[in-house]
Amino acid sequence: MKETSVLCLLFLISVLSCTTNQARLTVSPSSSQFFQGDFVSLSCEEDDSSAGWTLRRNTSKQQRTQCGRDGWGKPAGSSCNISYTDTVDSGVYWCESREGPISNMVNLTVTGGSVILQSPVLPVMEGDDVTLLCKTKTTPSNLPAAFYKDGSLIRKQPTGHMTIQHVSRSDEGLYKCDISGHGESPSSWITVTGEHTTTPPPTSTPPPTSTPPPGSSLRHMLSSVGSVCVVVLLVLLVLLGRQCVHRKPEAGQEETGEDDIITHVMYSFIKSSTTASQTKQRK
């Protein structure tokens, strides 16, 4: 009886020690816009490669396609390389695991035009300085450029660079630039956040043909609650643990003693798991 209880308890602890890993999608070069023919590498940065993260995307023609399997990209470890970008590569990209959780989403735009705006592809921290670069494909990237936010002219810069100092929430919006004689760039959304986050731009900002991947609401729930799935699993496994130790007591042994031990251990684990999850979220 005692050996059975110990084995069941060890099983419960080993299962509950598993945590849900969250991947972070990064883009190199770090930009939300690219010229047709550029090279781009997307990486699923993760704590545990055993989670099996894969890169997926939504475009105007295809939904939830996977790197290396659906006619685009070449897997390279936890990265996906697109050696020659085309306009059809414009869309929403994200990492997805076998277990279901997904990473942050990024919107990439590939243009056949001659001007792009290099802007942060990930959310920027409130108070940071952000530099925007208006770049042409064939000429030096130091030409005079005009910068726009939400359709209104912000300023004109003689060298094609514009720095927004100490960004705030009011700096969020759609940005684009224009170089006289060369053309106008596509628009890209810049997100400003007060804390480290992987929240994507509002659904109104991606290209009209790009829709958020299914399960995005689950991602938000997991990131805000953290250990909900673990707690639910705890409840189920507590019942399993009780069933494991619920045997006819030996002489002189009280039946409830071992139940109380397991309940105490499970309560301690719930408390420690919740604390660890909250600490991780603050980071």
Image (cartoon, rainbow, N blue to C red):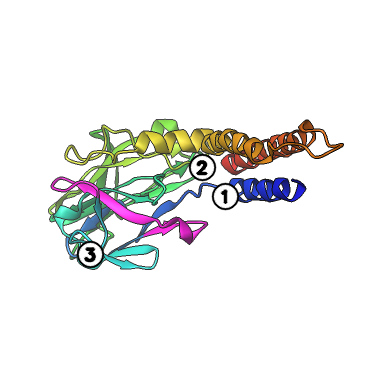
Name the residue at 55% across, 38% down: 233
Circles 1 and 3 in contact, beta carbons < 8 Å = no
Q: What is the CA distance from the residue labelled 2 to the residue labelled 1?
A: 24 Å
Mark 1 element type: loop
Foreground residue, 131 or 216? 216
Residue 251 in the image: state x and y as whole percent. Answer: 84, 38
Residue that numbered label 1 is attached to: 18
Q: Is residue 274 above or below residue 181?
A: above
Q: What is the CA distance from the residue labelled 1 to the residue labelled 3?
A: 40 Å
Circles 2 and 1 in contact, beta carbons < 8 Å = no
Name the residue at 41% across, 57% down: 52
Residue 4 in the image: state x and y as whole percent. Answer: 70, 48
**Residue 111 shows in the view:** no
* Residue type, numbered disc 2: His
In reply to whether residue 156 is colored magenta, the answer given is no
Quarter occupied by residue 190: top left
* Residue type, numbered disc 1: Cys
Name which of mark 1 and mark 3 comes first in the sequence.
Answer: 1
Name which of mark 2 and mark 1 comes first in the sequence.
Answer: 1
Residue that numbered label 2 is attached to: 196
Mark 2 element type: loop
In reply to whether residue 52 is colored magenta, the answer given is yes
Residue 199 — which label?
A: none
Q: Label 2: few (<14), some or many (≥20) within 10 Å? A: some
Residue 38 — which label?
A: 3
* Residue type, numbered disc 3: Asp
Q: In this view, does 140 lie above or below 96?
A: below
